[in-house]
Amino acid sequence: MRITILTLFPAMFDGALGESILRRAVDQGALQVERRNIRDYAQDRHHVVDDSSYGGGPGMLMKPEPLFRAVEDVRCQAGESGTWVVLMSPQGRTFTQKTAAELAGKPHLVLVCGHYEGVDERFREHGVDDEISIGDYVLTGGEPAALVVMDAVARLLPGVLGDPTSSEMDSFSAGLLEYPQYTRPAQFRAWKTPPVLLSGDHQAIARWRRRQAILRTLRRRPELLDTAGLSPDEIADALGPDPEGDAA
Ligand code: 9D3
């Protein structure tokens, strides 16, 4: 897969691309990342990319010409087919794991990062295929959001993470929060690892984990249970008679 990032601040991606999983994905050839500076597509002498808003109001907007020229240049060089252009924007559809999976199927993603108070409406309307927000909070620009999208998409590409983990394969745990996890030492300070996890009884461990995952989801993110595909019976069944006395 290929990802092109259109940004006024290409260096903001240096750190993330130079480390860890994203770097490995690029080194392995599973992912090709290209950054282009939108300012390079401005045609006036001072490479101006922003201007004030018609009708007045505070702040600056990104001018349409450099944005259209940048996207059209990428689309032409890519041969047009399979290029999916996404504007990172607070007004976009909210990014989820489902969106990540959908975008991971595109051969060429173009992530456009806005800055200032936003972009000229004609670019939003006629220049892009999609518009995505990563959640309801205010960033200084689209770059951190593009990084989030790129990271979530990259780990879904074949070969990037190695084999999918068994919990990702396990349809029972889909849509639930994770169960509590422990590693050595068995006791740290006053805090002991739940004995069932040291018991070697794999069936008991699986039951305990499932119960913990459901309890935790019920307490912290009850709305997730609506889409986890669990019937009330399955929930009651997994929770059972409450052996630890910690029912919700
Ligand atoms: C006062 C109106 N503001 C909208 C909330 C203007 C504005 C603030 C911040 C316009 C753009 C931005 C920069 N943010 C993004 O470009 C952005 C973003 C975000 O702020 N939150 C979540 N997802 C995203 S994707 C792009």
Image (cartoon, rainbow, N blue to C red):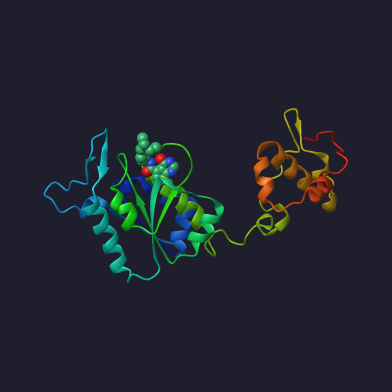
On the image, which quarter does residue 129 sit in?
A: bottom left
On the image, which quarter does residue 208 sit in?
A: top right
Q: Quadrant of ligand 1?
A: top left
**Horizontal and vertical percent position of residue 176:** 68, 48
Q: Residue furthest top?
A: 190
- Closer-to-camera residue (221/41): 221
**Horizontal and vertical percent position of residue 179:** 71, 44
On the image, which quarter does residue 70 sit in?
A: bottom left
Total numbered badges shown on the rendered structure: 0
Q: Is residue 59 visible?
A: yes
Q: Residue furthest front?
A: 55
Q: Is residue 140 visible?
A: no
What residue do we see at 49% from left, 65% from top?
A: 105
Residue 186 position (above or below residue 232): above
What residue do we see at 39% from left, 46% from top?
A: 89
**Horizontal and vertical percent position of residue 134:** 47, 45
**Horizontal and vertical percent position of residue 157:** 52, 62
Give left or right: position of 48 versus 155: left
Quarter of the image with the C terminus in it: top right
Quarter of the image with the N terminus in it: bottom left
Give left or right: position of 67 versus 221: left
- Closer-to-camera residue (199/3): 3
Give left or right: position of 41 versus 221: left
Residue 223 position (above or below residue 43): above
